[in-house]
Image (spheres, helix red, strand yellow):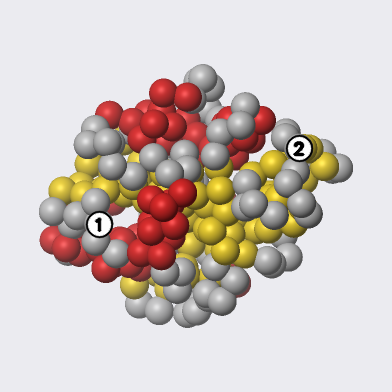
Amino acid sequence: MKAMVFAAGCGQRLRPLTDTRPKALVEVAGRTLLEHVVRRLVEAGVTEAIINLHHLGEQIPTFLEQHDCFGLRRVAYSAESTLLGTGGGLKQAAWFFDDGNPFFVHNTDVLSTIDLNALLLAHRRSQALATLAVMARPTARPLYFDSAGRLIGRRSPTGGDELVRAAEGTIEPLGFCGIQAVSPAVFGQMSESGSFGITEAYLRLAGAKAMILAHRVDGAKWRDCGRLEDLRPL
């Protein structure tokens, strides 16, 4: 089982901690964010991972080597001279996912108790292009899903609603948790290039009837550790 961990962000809202370390190596409860994420992925059966690097990224391979990669059998790195965004970062790492099997994508600044095995099982059963862990929670940037769990739109960054396909039944706004299961077939359908967000690609694909599905995780604990006040145990 493989995974990608997004760890390239500069962590501006975590300064001054990120003046001297990458966001992935900021600590919560005595462990770095990266350790929290990698340990959870290993528990879910991940043996190989690729991590994208940018801000002070040279510290990450050294850290992992000092800790035997927390049980990972293989770790690869995808250096970004300029930030590529979540979509561009994933696309640059496409070469790593060469076995035809679905894989996890996990933001390094997300702590959760989400059942990763259940997410993967739902993804395999539906044969979706991507399955997003989502929950009903307050967010300024919800994604919209219909009664069939299909991605159909989002709240636009400029305000208002952006719908890309007709809904089946009711429409519900949900918060994306930064954790997903993805099929490698997605790479052949990514026409975007350079720096772009994965949500933008998914919305385009959803508009073309691709299966981008929700996996509800409402009962799980979850936190985006993007701010200093968020650096506390779940």
Residue that carries the numbered disc 2 in the rendered image:
166
Q: Is residue 12 left or right of residue 23?
A: right
Q: Are marks 1 and 2 in contact (CB under 8 Å)?
A: no
As displayed, is residue 206 above or below residue 24?
above
Secondary structure under tag 1 reads: loop
Image side of residue 213 versus residue 90, left or right:
right
Q: Is residue 90 visible?
A: yes
Determine the secondary structure under disc 2. loop
Q: Amino acid at mark 1?
A: Val
Label 1 – label 2 distance at C-alpha: 36 Å
Residue 222: where, in percent of width, then height?
54, 70
Residue at position x 72%, y 59% in the image: 139
Q: Is residue 111 above or below residue 210?
A: below
Judged left or right of residue 73, residue 226 is: right
> Residue at (54%, 39%) from the top-left corner?
211
Kind of residue sitting beneath label 2: Ala
Q: What is the count of numbered marks?
A: 2
When the figure is inspected, residue 188 is found, relative to residue 226, above or below; the finding is: above
Q: What residue sits right under mark 1 in the picture?
A: 46
Position of residue 68 relative to residue 128, above or below, is: below
Give the residue at x 38% y 56%.
Answer: 120
Which label lies toward us, 1 or 2? 2
Viewer-closest of 20 and 180? 180
Residue 93 image position (x, y, % from top left): 34, 33
